């Protein structure tokens, strides 16, 4: 079993929003995961799809068949927060936190030992 991964650092979305979409594709085949992400109407789906396509390209570069790969893990961690200020009444200020995240998708090969047992 071999492992291929791809990272997307500093994605401009909060980790909470990304984890909602990441749960949809865990333990799915790559083609099924791409279909799910294509028809999910969220910004997070586009960011995760971009990372998944990068992981598939990495797998093809290392001579793996993309049809035999499954999404083993999708790790979403919090990145740095960009802090901005918004002026308010009476000289006060409100803070705006623009959150970022890191996305890591790990693909693994489907074990082909099942087919060997059925051949006689």
Image (cartoon, rainbow, N blue to C red):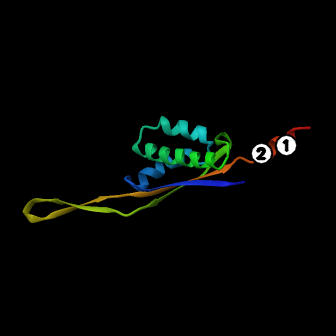
Does 3 sit left or right of 16 as displayed?
right
Task: Decide: few, some or many residues near mark 1? Use Cα within 10 Å; few <14, some 14-19, many ≥20.
Answer: few
Q: Which residue is mark 1?
A: 116
Q: Give percent across and percent down for residue 82.
A: 31, 61
Nearer the observer, 106 or 89: 106
Residue 42 sits in quarter: top left
Tell me where residue 2 appears, x and y as whole percent: 69, 54
Q: Quadrant of residue 117?
A: top right
Residue in the image at 43% along x and 56% along y: 15
Name the residue tied to disc 2: 112
Q: Position of residue 81 (x, y in %)?
A: 34, 62
Tell me if mark 2 has few (under 14), some (14-19) or many (20+) residues whose alpha carbon lies within 10 angstroms of its own.
few
Q: Residue at x 61, y 43 (%)?
A: 28
> In the figure, 95 relative to 69: above or below?
below
Q: Position of residue 33 (x, y in %)?
A: 56, 41
Q: Are marks 1 and 2 in contact (CB under 8 Å)?
A: yes
Q: CA distance from mark 1 to mark 2?
A: 7 Å
Q: Residue at x 16, y 63 (%)?
A: 93
């Amino acid at each position: 079993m071999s492992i291929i991964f791809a990272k997307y650092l500093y994605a401009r979305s909060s980790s909470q929003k990304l984890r909602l979409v990441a749960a949809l594709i865990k333990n799915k085949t790559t083609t099924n995961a791409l279909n799910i992400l294509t028809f999910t109407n969220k910004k997070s789906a586009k960011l995760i799809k971009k990372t998944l396509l990068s992981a598939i390209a990495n797998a093809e570069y290392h001579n793996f068949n993309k049809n035999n790969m499954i999404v083993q893990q999708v790790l979403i961690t919090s990145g740095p927060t960009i802090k901005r200020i918004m002026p308010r009444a009476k000289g006060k200020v409100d803070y705006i936190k623009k959150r970022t995240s890191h996305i890591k998708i790990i693909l693994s090969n489907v074990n082909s030992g099942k087919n060997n047992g059925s051949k006689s």
